[in-house]
Amino acid sequence: MDVFILLLEGIFVSFQPLNLGLLIFGCLIGLFVGAMPGLGSVNGVAILIPITFIIPPTAAIIFLAAVYYGAMYGGAISSVMLGIPGASTAVATVFDGRPLAVKGEAMTALTAAAVGSFVGGTVSVILFTLFAPPLAEVALRFNAPETFALMVMAFATFVGLGGDDVPKTIFSILIGLALSTIGLDLITGKPRLIFFNIPGFLHGINFLVLAIGIYGIGEMLWTLEETKGKVQMSKLSVNMKEVGRAFGALKKTIMAMNIGSFLGFFVGILPAAGATPASLMSYGITKQLSKNSKEFGSGVPAGVVAPECANNSASTGSMLPMLTLGIPGSPTTAILLGGMILWGLTPGPLLFTQEPEFVWGLIGSLYIANFFTLVLNIALIPAFLMVLRIPFAILAPVIFVLCVTGGYAPTQSLHDVWLMLLFGFAGYILRKLDYPVAPAVLSIVLGPLAEKALRQSLILSDGSMGIFFDMAEKPIAAIIMYIAIVLLIMPAFGPLYRKFFKKAQTT
Amino acid sequence: MSITNKITVKRAEIVVAVILALCSIALMIKSAENRITWNAEENMGAGFLPFYLSLGMFICTVLTIIKFVLKRSPQSKDDSPFIDAEAFKYIAVTIISLVILVLAIGYLGIYFSLIFFLAFYLRYFSSKSILFISVFSLITPVLTFLFFEWLLKIPLPQGISEPLFYPVYDFMYS
């Protein structure tokens, strides 16, 4: 009952004129950002954070969450119409969305994507409302050792479940953490890693500089290389008959909606996972369980619904650990978490008691944003198609302008703009060589929090690392640490398992 | 053979791994300017975390190099060009123009630099008319000015062009 009242208050907060206006504006920007090839929620949120400095934190989080949400819907538009995923989260949508468009059923694909996103979003936000308060209550009992253990687990999840090259993943985590140590030491006050005595390093490296560099500049370079500014758009006829037929085709996608919504939510909660693996897994499982699995890939609506349900559901799911534990569930929530620190908030369970308007305003806004994005998405399809026709050679410099101004605004230092360019170029090269970049962004956000928790824990234990493994004194920290160790060593058993499995098959 | 064909994925992988290994060593040396030890009496030295994080980075790059030598990574067997010739043109021009943009911001100020950057970029990569390019290159900095200086009250760098903005500020704040 309490939850219901708090939720109603949250919905009321999101209906306040400023919040509602920003919510609708955020949904629109998100749809646009998601639809543009090369831009996704993470790019949109990273580039737009600097403009939230002048509005209250609740309005800022509602705006950015709406951008996040809208981008999940929008990603499908370019996947279907151009055959290029608007973002990595919409990669699986191409598998059946594009063949549907090629067959002349683009409207069916777009409607399936929009309705799938709505169902996934609705189911996940209900699960979020139910799970968040009890999880936050448990997390309130966490002290420094538990917090540090949780952060180690977040890093370990990237290694265990990320699926990327292990040394490269660990390198990415470590470089993010190393970058977060630049500047003045928290405890001793001594300057650390001040290269060439450049004073700009004294204030440390703002996470936004890395995030905009990697997801703004780096991503644009990547997209310029992939598309070379050329795209091929499918034809689309929009009329009520087409829309009606498209809704009719959705009757056979109930299973895909269930798999996408629930699987997406739980995969989204995992720190390394987020919406991209959630959508790919949902597509794979729906295909496996479908009676018509052979038709997948040739253009079936269920192949669009499953990943779209999942990516929306995962985006909401990834906010659960962000709000309750202070651990982001995806690269986008890592940036949102960094934003919360910039706005003067302390991410974690205390938000539920100290900033109820912020927390419940965000949760309430997810319900509202879900509805508005569905309506805007379907109503504005022709407008988005016009936007998609903008040549990339025009869009790219505009995004570069946003990156340069966004990189300058937080600290008003050209030093940071240079660093942003450097990170952009480096991120582009590293990504081409399969170095995952998301762990670096997560690490630079969590780095200062992890260091603080580690040092506080060591002061508590008189310098003994045993505090993290003491089942009698700190059982939660110990269990989390052991899970983290299992996750860290898990990839080592992958090749052994495959070898054994192959041997068993041959004999 | 063009330069883009000479730089294969295989070569890029090993060159980048070696550069990252060297950077990690440089970070370790830099971290050692502070105390890198840790014990119960003295607690953690300011250089402890950066040093061991850099050491971890170095170990990861060594593992990447070993995987490369043993041909265990996909990149170690990939002789395809790291970047194709057409894409290289886009990337190289973009990177150079961005570097010149940031250099120009420090001297000319952001608004005039943006005009030149946009005009050059659009002229080079798009087939739009001179009129479109001129209008677009002028409007974008104006909108940027209004958004940052008027709405957000965040002053952007103006370099030698700063005096030109005094009348605008007089008008805005009068």
Image: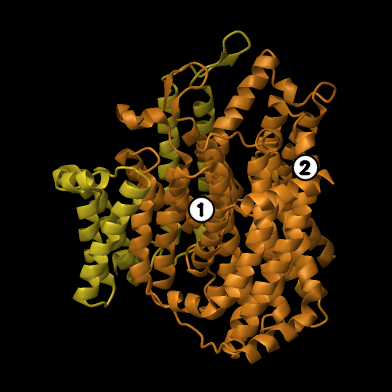
Chain colours: A orange, B yellow
Residue in the picture at 30% in, 42% down:
B155
- Image spot of residue A420 (x, y percent): 38, 46
Name, please, the residue furthest toward the top.
Answer: B41
- Image spot of residue A345 (x, y percent): 58, 35
- Image spot of residue A207 (x, y percent): 48, 41
Q: Secondary structure at mark 2?
A: helix
Residue in the picture at 79% in, 56% down:
A500
Residue at which label 1 appears:
A45
Question: Pointer 1: residues within 10 angstroms few (<14), some, or many (20+)?
Answer: many
Judged by depth in the image, the label closer to the viewer, 1 or 2, is 2
Q: Secondary structure at mark 1?
A: helix
Q: Is residue A287 visible?
A: yes
| Chain letter behind tag 2 | A
Give the label on residue A133, or none: 2
Q: Quadrant of residue A460?
A: top right
The reply to whether callout 1 and callout 2 are in contact (CB within 8 Å) is no
